[in-house]
């Protein structure tokens, strides 16, 4: 099966934070990162090797600070790796970043629509950045807003939309140029259970259309329910990568949480 | 073009607020120093010829900086609204350069708005000529572009919490020591200041506009103005794009 995404030896090291930040972290009892504890650079990713197959729903799960967002950042060309290589849809994220961006859609961790524009304008202008003519973009935008059940908010200012509606707008924005690969960074954080279930249905539908989806989450049930395969990540390292069923089969109680604890030595949250 | 279209839409929507924000201060100065004080006899009529080009320079400065710096701070702030443009299939330096271009255009719009109103408030101005329209537009463009580049650098290098410092420590001194309200030659009486202010781009914009709008009055050689502003634009533009890239890509 061809790979939509490949990473080899992917490493990201952030420069050491300021002394003030280190003092603050130390006084808060933050020992979640070896780099901070040692007073040196922060190793966010440590030689990560991943293959994501075309058409796969790939879940990445790990606690806060595991390196999930950094991985997404590198694959979406927003973060430059310190070492290693990554290709998305055959294009290198460092050497062919424009080509990568042409082929991907990104739903960020926190909705960040353009607040100077209304919902429809957000979609139409984003489509224009990809060279999609206005008439086509407007039609696609209307369809997406309808499908995501926010058509009534087409002319609304972004600030008039709820968090769940803004998240749907982000999904619409990520899809407006019909990308092959969709990245979602913790898309259900802050959503109520009903909105969460609704979003799951949307993601299942998108996956059913044959898109490759990469989703980070720190909700085990979410990864379990939606993913074809799950990568467990902690402290920048890949702990395990397999189907949800295969991972759960390695535990006595069939729980992904238990499996994660057995590898990481601590709970997910 | 799509980026420009987006900024044009936002500018059009916010035009009245943009014009008020960027032209109110220069026009207040015009009313006081260009109309009231000459009428009271505290300033000669000749002073108006010195003031008008300087006020034009000030309006270019304020609008170009504010139209780039403040939105940059917001875009890269907590909301991170810039991301939809950073995810576009466009080389990221081009996004930064587009911001400079938009700031330049907005600066020109502010200048075009201020010039006739200032002339109306101050009345006839000795030595004022519009015979050098091309040169006037060129100097205004160069000045506006330079300040837009400064705005890009400030907007990406300065944290939002430091915005007050930006106005107090950078913009206010720039405006008052930019030879906008007095000619550079007038600083012959304070030689140290005469040469210290030469790092201020507003000095060249104000003097350049004096050279094309009121050429009979004292002004810097236009060749010097163009050369220095071009050099500043290149250097600050490079710094601004580099700072933008540092914020855009971790």
Image: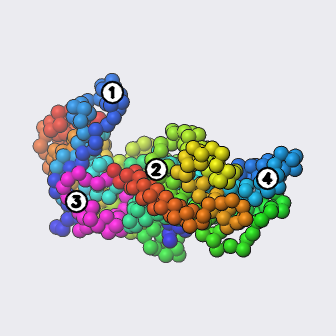
Identify the subunit bearing mark 3: A
Q: Residues within 10 Å of mark 3 (few under 14, many from 20)?
A: many
Q: Which mark is residue B34?
A: 4
Viewer-nearest of labels 1 and 4?
4
Residue A91 falls within the magenta-colored stretch = yes
State left or right for residue B1 relative to residue B249.
right
Q: Is residue B156 visible?
A: yes
Residue at the disc numbered 2: B156
Q: Earlier in the sequence, mark 2 or mark 4?
A: 4
Contact (CB < 8 A) between labels 1 and 4? no
Q: Are marks 3 and 4 on the same chain?
A: no
Viewer-nearest of labels 3 and 4?
4
SS category of the residue bearing label 3: strand
Identify the subunit bearing mark 4: B
Residue at the disc numbered 1: A23
Magenta span: A79-108
Label 1, label 2: how far apart the Cα atoms are: 26 Å
Q: Nearer the viewer, residue B125 or A176?
A: B125
Q: Are marks 1 and 4 on the same chain?
A: no
Q: Earlier in the sequence, mark 1 or mark 3?
A: 1
Q: Which mark is residue A86?
A: 3
């Amino acid at each position: 099966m061809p790979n939509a995404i490949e990473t080899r030896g992917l490493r990201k090291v952030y420069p050491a934070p300021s002394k003030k930040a280190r003092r603050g972290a130390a006084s808060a009892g933050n020992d979640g990162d070896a780099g901070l504890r040692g007073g040196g650079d922060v190793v966010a990713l440590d030689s990560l090797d991943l293959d994501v197959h075309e058409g796969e729903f790939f879940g990445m799960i790990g606690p806060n600070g595991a390196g999930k967002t950094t991985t997404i950042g590198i694959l979406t060309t927003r973060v430059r790796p310190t070492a290693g290589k990554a290709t998305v849809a055959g294009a290198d994220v460092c050497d062919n970043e424009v080509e990568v961006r042409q082929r991907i859609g990104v739903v960020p961790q926190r909705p960040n629509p353009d607040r100077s524009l209304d919902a429809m304008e957000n979609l139409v202008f984003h489509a224009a950045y990809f060279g999609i003519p206005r008439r086509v973009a407007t039609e696609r935008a209307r369809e997406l807003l309808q499908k995501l059940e926010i058509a009534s908010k087409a002319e609304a200012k972004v600030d008039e939309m709820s968090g769940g509606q803004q998240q749907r707008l982000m999904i619409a924005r990520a899809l407006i140029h019909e990308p092959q690969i969709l990245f979602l960074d913790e898309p259900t954080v802050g959503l109520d259970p009903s909105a969460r279930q609704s979003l799951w249905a949307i993601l299942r539908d998108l996956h059913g259309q044959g898109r490759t989806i990469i989703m980070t989450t720190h909700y085990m049930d979410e990864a379990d329910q939606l993913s074809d395969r799950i990568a467990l990540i902690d402290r920048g390292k890949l702990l395990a990568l397999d189907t949800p069923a295969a991972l759960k089969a390695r535990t006595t109680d069939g729980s992904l949480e238990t499996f994660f604890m057995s590898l990481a030595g601590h709970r997910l949250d | 073009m799509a980026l420009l279209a987006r900024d044009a839409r936002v500018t059009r929507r916010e035009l009245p607020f943009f014009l008020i924000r960027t032209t109110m201060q220069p026009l207040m100065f015009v009313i006081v120093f260009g109309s009231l004080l000459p009428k009271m006899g505290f300033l000669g009529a000749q002073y108006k010829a010195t003031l008008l080009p300087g006020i034009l320079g000030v309006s270019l400065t304020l609008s170009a900086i504010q139209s780039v710096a403040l939105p940059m701070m917001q875009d890269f702030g907590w909301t991170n609204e810039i991301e939809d443009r950073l995810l576009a299939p466009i080389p990221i330096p081009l996004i930064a350069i587009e911001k400079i271009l938009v700031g330049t255009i907005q600066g020109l719009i502010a200048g075009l708005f201020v010039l006739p109103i200032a002339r109306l408030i101050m009345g006839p101005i000795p030595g004022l000529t519009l015979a050098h329209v091309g040169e006037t537009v060129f100097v205004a463009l160069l000045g506006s572009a330079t300040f837009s580049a400064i705005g890009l650098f400030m907007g990406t290098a300065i944290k939002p919490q430091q915005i007050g410092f930006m106005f107090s420590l950078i913009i206010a001194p720039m405006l008052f020591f930019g030879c906008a309200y007095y000619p550079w030659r007038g600083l012959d009486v304070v030689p140290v200041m005469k040469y210290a202010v030469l790092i201020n781009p507003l000095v060249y914009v104000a003097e350049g506009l004096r050279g094309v709008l009121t050429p009979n009055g004292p002004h810097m050689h236009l060749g010097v103005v163009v050369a220095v502003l071009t050099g500043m634009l290149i250097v600050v533009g490079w710094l601004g794009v580099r700072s933008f890239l540092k914020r855009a890509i971790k």
